Amino acid sequence: MCGIVGYVGTAKSVEVLLGGLRRLEYRGYDSAGIAVLDGDGSIHTRKHAGKLAVLLNDLDQHPIANGSTGIGHTRWATHGGPTDVNAHPHLGDDGKLALIHNGIIENFSELKEELLAEGYTFESETDTEVAAKLLGREYGRAHDLELAFRTVVARLEGAFTLLAVHRDEPDVVVGARRNSPLVIGLGDGENFLGSDVAAFVEFTRRAVAIGQDQIVAIRADSVTVTDFAGAPVTTEEFDIAWDASASEKGGWSSFMAKEITEGPDAVANTLRGRIVDGEVVLPDLDRIGDEALRGITRIVIVACGTAAYSGILGKYAIEAWSRVPVEVELAHEFRYRDPVLDDSTLVISISQSGETMDTRMAVQYASEHGARVLSICNTQGATIPRESEAVIYTHAGPEVAVASTKAFLAQVAALYLFGLHLSRVRGSLDAAEIEANAAELQAVPEKLGKVLESSESIAQLAGWMADTRAVLFLGRNVGYPVALEGALKLKELAYIHAEGFAAGELKHGPIALIEPGQPVFVIVPSPIGQPELHKKVISNIKEIEARGARVLAVAEEGDAFVPPLADFVIPIPLAGPFFEPLLAVAPLQIFAMELASAKGLDVDQPRNLAKSVTVE
Ligand code: M6R
């Protein structure tokens, strides 16, 4: 989704803005542009459809004046296709003002009618240009950018982060936020705005999150935040834990390749300081409190995509350990079906970005309907944790590739920590059981490191399968979400039809898809940890093998039943049932990435996808 950067200071803003946009590229976009004020009171804009490289190239060939106030934008098209004209910034009618926008202005047609009737003309098909013209009109009346903003935001419906600069106020960038992300970066003699902290982490580690329905004005030496009515609001500063180099590709061929190898660290960092002498320590939950946790009768996990699959793993473990019933629901389905909620329901949202609009709306709905809300999130200063009662941060570090990899592992680790904590509070596990599970969890990073050593053979397999048109994934119990995740990865990266099935469901329909040569990944449970399920999955393998399927198995090292039946075996180290999925998922991530690479596709930014889906 759109990325936004604003800067006021003493540096050359073109460089700062382009650096910020590069760091926000991961959000997904199809055009990019900047507007810069120079010292003579002129506004210079440049924008292009396509990747940032197109804009950079143009700016190289035809540089623009480089003042120290400016705004930059990467656009993910909603209203109007990805063209130069529709790219942001958009100008006010007199060309003195430039505006960028993330979100959707739902009442833009009626506002456009109003402006057309007043003689305004429009170049683009965007809702953003309507806001730019409206702001230009209001500036003409108020002669003050902040005042004009207040009038404009009162007229807008929908989701928006807006940033604008005006020729007559060259030392300020003004922004407004409703339902779309915006964070302030506090510098020394310079200040920043960004869709998230990645936009400015290169320059400062001090940040302030902006609340819902607030207006911010940054100058080189000051930052003011007010509500939409102009009343000052209190803000809280936080330190950015990510360091700038963490979101650099380094020598890796892709961010995804780098992030897969960071999986063990993502888990280790999420556990760090949270398991002490075999006990789980989660002060993060203090705001909910043990008494409330003892009163919980039901848990509902809400999330989207990969985060929802981590939720399914969480469900299996939390329910088994704490004996509290757990449901997992896609966040976008949750609030539209009038779910039963009260204060004995704990809703757990999971989101890497903390900005996924569907998940955010589910959190809001749950709070409004009296449920307790805990979030698991990877991004400081994001909206979802701010709007939740308590948050467990995963410490996976910045995830730049659109496909979620290390964040998934960290989410599962956080859910397991929560499950063990809840079990202690409710007395459903004794200290020895908690300690044993905590030890298993702590052993995951090292075991995962071993799994990553088989990357080369998985890459080879993917290379052989570059022409494959469809792949099926089967798993049972905790292997089921792994199958779903393997299929999602392959779809989004390699554009191959892929389906994940619960292996037990096979004979209820999906087996009809099996024909000679059909590749099927099977996640095989441990013969030691889950002997009953192991037998059942071996039977499933026999059923598909008999019908000519090519069986690609992810199985425990030393499982002698699998090699005679499988065409390819990916071994994973021995681990308890809940911990095996954390090991089994990595080969599937690698497979999808390598197959996409073999097809010559962009693994970091697959077509049509955005990293953070900030509109519903
Ligand atoms: O930022 P979130 O964790 O809320 O994102 C949720 C999904 O959009 C995300 O996991 C998506 O499914 C990924 N592209 C999967 O790789």
Image (cartoon, rainbow, N blue to C red):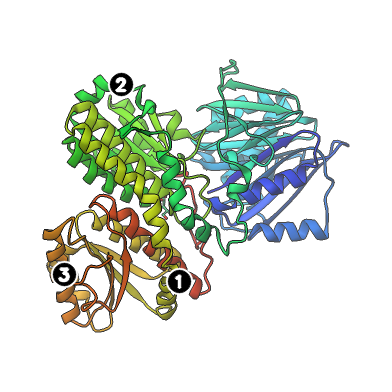
Q: Nearer the viewer, mark 2 or mark 1?
A: 1
For disc 1, the marked residue is 456
Q: Which residue is mark 3?
A: 538
- Label 2: few (<14), some (14–19) or many (≥20) C-alpha neighbours in 10 Å: few
- Mark 1, Cα crowd under 10 Å, few <14 / some 14-19 / many 20+, is few
Q: Residue at x 16, y 81 (%)?
A: 546
The reply to whether residue 342 is visible in this rendering is no
Q: Is residue 402 left or right of residue 563?
A: right
Q: Quadrant of residue 55?
A: bottom right
Q: Which residue is mark 2?
A: 289
Considering only vertical position in the picture, is 263 above or below 563? above
Tell me which label, 2 or 3, sits earlier in the chain: 2
Amino acid beneath label 2: Gly
- Residue 327 pos. (x, y %): 22, 41
Q: x, y (%) of residue 163? A: 64, 36
Q: Given the image, on which type of amino acid does mark 1 rest?
A: Glu
**Distance from label 2 to label 3 (Cα)?**
45 Å
- The answer to whether 551 appears left or right of 275 in the picture is left
Which residue shows up at 27% across the image and 54% down it?
Answer: 575
* Quarter residue 67 falls in: top right
Q: Quadrant of residue 426?
A: top left
Q: Quadrant of the C terminus?
A: top left
Closer to the camera: disc 2 or disc 3? 3
Which of the pair 348/333 is nearer the observer? 348
Q: Residues within 10 Å of mark 3 (few under 14, many from 20)?
A: some
The one nearer the camera, 369 or 572, is 572
Q: Amino acid at mark 3?
A: Ile
Q: CA distance from mark 2 to mark 1?
A: 47 Å
